[in-house]
């Protein structure tokens, strides 16, 4: 369905394969982690582990990079929660009753009913846990989406046509000001990923955001050297945008 929408509007799709390729370009360790952790519910330890936080930051950076190409479709990977609050982004959820999804998986993968049921349950649990742990949102909450479709009651063609019309409307909401928000947030994501993937420093609870005017860094550093490295990284990657650093020393 995403391919049909892309062909109708000239949009480029990005899903799991493209994310893996991006992670591989960042380093083999990140490709390995993606394959191991792809939307898996993180444990309490994972959420505060340096490597896991760096992995999430890289994935978010990729989503922003793909969105910056304009006319982009992000399939899964938490894209609706990364690109939230952008007026020209259409957040869509496609769903179907459990038994329908099981039957379609059985037909597609040629597996038994019990195996298909286990996969569907495990996949749902992992996605729900990932979104809740990383973004604090409920994956099932319909308020997190602009449109929700039941693929058991509507054909893919019908759904595609509705989405295409909605995207044409969303395209009209792209202005210099709204696009600048995306560009600023993408710059903040790159900075965060660069800092978190730097094994020479460790900044607990690092937050890098764009408030519409400045890139804001918040967190805790161990010493002056770490502060300097973080500051230099932010300045060199800020693309000329003002920066506000609110880093504090430990202890």
Image (cartoon, rainbow, N blue to C red):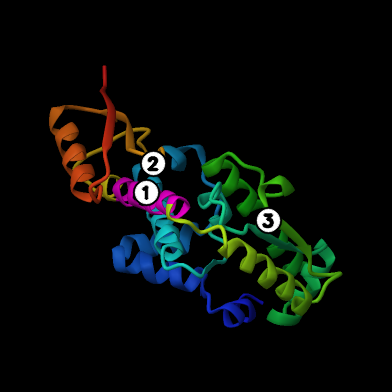
Q: Which residue is mark 3?
A: 124
Q: Secondary structure at mark 2?
A: strand
Q: Is the stretch drawn in magenta largely helix, strand or loop?
A: helix
Q: Are marks 2 and 3 in contact (CB under 8 Å)?
A: no
**Residue 190 part of the magenta segment:** yes
In the image, the segment drawn in magenta is 177-193
On the image, which quarter does residue 8 sit in?
bottom right
Residue sitting nearer the eye, 94 or 183: 183
| Position of residue 103 measured from the top left corner of the image (x, y, whole percent) | 80, 74
- Rounded to the nearest angstrom, the CA distance separating label 1 from label 3 is 32 Å
Horizontal placement of 196 versus 171: left or right?
Answer: left
Vertical side of 158 occupied by 94: above or below:
above
Give whichever of discs 2 and 3 has the lower sequence position: 3
Of circles 2 and 3, the one toward us is 2
Q: Label 2, on which residue?
A: 210
Q: Earlier in the sequence, mark 1 or mark 2?
A: 1
Residue 141 visible in this rendered orientation of the protein: no
Residue 10, visible in the rendered structure = yes
Mark 1 or mark 3: whose residue is earlier in sequence: 3
Q: Is residue 152 magenta?
A: no
Say if mark 1 contacts mark 2, CB within 8 Å.
Answer: yes
Residue occupying the far right of the picture? 153
The residue carrying mark 1 is 184
Q: Which residue lies at the image location 72% right of the left edge and 58% below the top edge?
A: 147
Distance in Å between CA atoms under marks 2 and 3: 31 Å
In the picture, which quadrant includes the C terminus?
top left
Give the side of residue 113 with respect to residue 200, left or right.
right
User: Residue sitting at 48 percent across and 56 percent down?
Assistant: 175
């Amino acid at each position: 369905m995403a391919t049909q929408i892309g062909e109708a509007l000239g949009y480029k799709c990005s899903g799991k394969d493209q994310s893996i390729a991006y992670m591989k370009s960042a380093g083999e360790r990140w490709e390995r982690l993606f394959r191991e952790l792809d939307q898996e519910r993180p444990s309490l330890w994972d959420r505060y582990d340096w490597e896991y936080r760096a992995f999430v930051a890289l994935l978010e950076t990729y989503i922003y990079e793909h969105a910056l190409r304009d006319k982009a479709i992000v399939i899964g990977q938490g894209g609706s929660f990364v690109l939230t609050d952008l007026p020209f982004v259409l957040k869509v959820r496609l769903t179907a009753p459990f038994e329908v999804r099981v039957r379609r998986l059985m037909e597609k993968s040629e597996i038994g009913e019990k195996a298909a049921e286990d996969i569907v349950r495990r996949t749902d649990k992992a996605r729900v846990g990932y979104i809740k742990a990383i973004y604090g949102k409920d994956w099932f909450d319909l308020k997190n989406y602009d449109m929700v479709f039941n693929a058991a009651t509507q054909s893919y063609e019908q759904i595609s046509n509705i989405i295409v019309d909605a995207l044409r409307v969303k395209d009209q909401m792209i202005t210099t000001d709204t696009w600048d928000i995306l560009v600023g947030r993408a710059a903040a994501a790159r900075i965060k990923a660069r800092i978190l993937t730097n094994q020479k420093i460790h900044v607990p609870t690092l937050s890098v955001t764009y408030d519409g005017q400045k890139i804001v860094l918040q967190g805790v550093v161990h010493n002056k050297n770490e502060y300097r490295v973080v500051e230099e990284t932010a300045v060199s990657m800020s693309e000329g945008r003002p920066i506000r650093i609110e880093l504090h020393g430990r202890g």
